[in-house]
């Protein structure tokens, strides 16, 4: 059996999937702030984090590398505390969740089978004058309002950009944008001892596929029966066109994720359970207020 077929067969029994993903601050909270307020707040946060030893700019003494950060002495302790709190609440305190630590590097057929190679894309445009790269849908929403680009095809985006004659946000020139095109968000690297024998592979853009790949192994070794979940904490990588918002949206990031598998027909009940359970973790364990 080839890997693609085994991957499909492994996923078939899952039936229903609930995905719980956390970064340092939920995107819903960031999205609720006005852009001007967010930018102003982040400047203050970045300054305090560096001054107090929580987060440093990556590769700073060599000129830095955009959108990379190092956690300092206090930041790494805070990060470890958060991960330990999550693991205790979602794994150790529950009888129906087990842990996993899957590999960052996977056979490239995994990403072909999951659709990431062909579909894990963002629309990209370039300014021909200053060479600035811009994510087309976010640019349109900045110009036209949040949600404007939802569901738009590349052709429609190109039409709106051309008719509106928007100025480049970097150089201010108008009519200099290229046609929008798909840009795959996965980082490609080589696996092998020599260039001739190397295999093109990808750094994982999410931790979920490692869970799906090991579903059969977990069931066999732990004798688990549905409903149950598999949790893991690990690094993921996405080559974002416009990575921003400090450590809240980076190209290298850590996910705390749990996939929960249940019988068909019970998904609404379980979904309600996990919404309440996750909200309780955020408010009671982490201490985030329900209203910001």
Image (tube, rainbow, N blue to C red):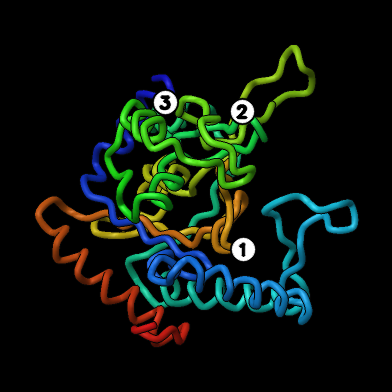
Closer to viewer: mark 1 or mark 2: 2
Do we see residue 235 in this rendering?
A: no
Q: Give the number of the disc on residue 128.
A: 2
Closer to viewer: mark 3 or mark 1: 1
The residue sitting at 65% across, 72% down in the picture is 43
- SS assignment at label 1: helix
Disc 1 versus disc 2: distance between alpha carbons? Answer: 27 Å
**Residue 162 spot, x, y in % from top left:** 40, 30
Q: The N terminus is located in which quarter? A: top left
Horizontally, is 8 left or right of 110 in the view? left
- SS assignment at label 3: helix
Horizontally, is 33 left or right of 185 in the view? left
Residue at label 1?
A: 246
Q: Earlier in the sequence, mark 3 or mark 1?
A: 3
**Residue 169 spot, x, y in % from top left:** 57, 47
Closer to viewer: mark 3 or mark 2: 2
Name which quarter of the figure residue 52 lies in. bottom right
Q: Earlier in the sequence, mark 1 or mark 2?
A: 2
Q: Earlier in the sequence, mark 3 or mark 2?
A: 3
Residue at label 3?
A: 118
- SS assignment at label 2: loop
């Amino acid at each position: 059996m080839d890997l693609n077929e085994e991957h499909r067969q492994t996923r078939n029994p899952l039936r229903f999937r609930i995905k719980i993903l956390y970064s340092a601050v939920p995107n819903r909270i960031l999205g609720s702030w006005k852009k001007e307020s967010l930018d102003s707040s982040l400047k203050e946060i970045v300054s305090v984090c560096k001054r107090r030893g929580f987060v440093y700019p990556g590769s700073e003494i060599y000129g830095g590398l955009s959108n990379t950060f190092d956690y300092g002495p206090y930041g790494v302790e805070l990060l470890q505390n958060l991960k330990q709190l999550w693991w205790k609440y979602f794994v150790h305190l529950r009888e129906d969740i087990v842990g996993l630590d899957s590999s960052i590097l996977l056979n490239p057929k995994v990403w072909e089978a999951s659709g990431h190679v062909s579909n894990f894309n963002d629309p990209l445009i370039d300014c021909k004058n200053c060479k600035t790269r811009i994510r087309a849908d976010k640019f349109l929403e900045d110009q036209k309002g949040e949600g404007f680009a939802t569901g738009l095809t590349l052709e429609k985006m190109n039409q709106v950009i051309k008719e509106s004659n928007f100025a480049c946000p970097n150089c201010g020139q108008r009519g200099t944008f290229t046609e929008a095109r798909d840009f795959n968000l996965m980082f490609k690297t080589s696996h092998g001892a020599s260039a001739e024998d190397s295999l093109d592979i990808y750094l994982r853009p999410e931790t979920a596929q490692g869970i799906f790949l090991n579903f059969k192994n977990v069931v066999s070794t732990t004798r688990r029966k549905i409903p149950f979940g598999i949790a893991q904490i690990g690094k993921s990588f996405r080559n974002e066109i416009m990575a921003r918002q400090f450590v809240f949206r980076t190209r290298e990031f850590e996910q705390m994720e749990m996939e929960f598998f249940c019988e068909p027909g019970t998904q609404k009940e379980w979904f309600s359970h996990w919404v309440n359970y996750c909200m309780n973790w955020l408010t009671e364990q982490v201490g985030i207020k329900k209203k910001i």
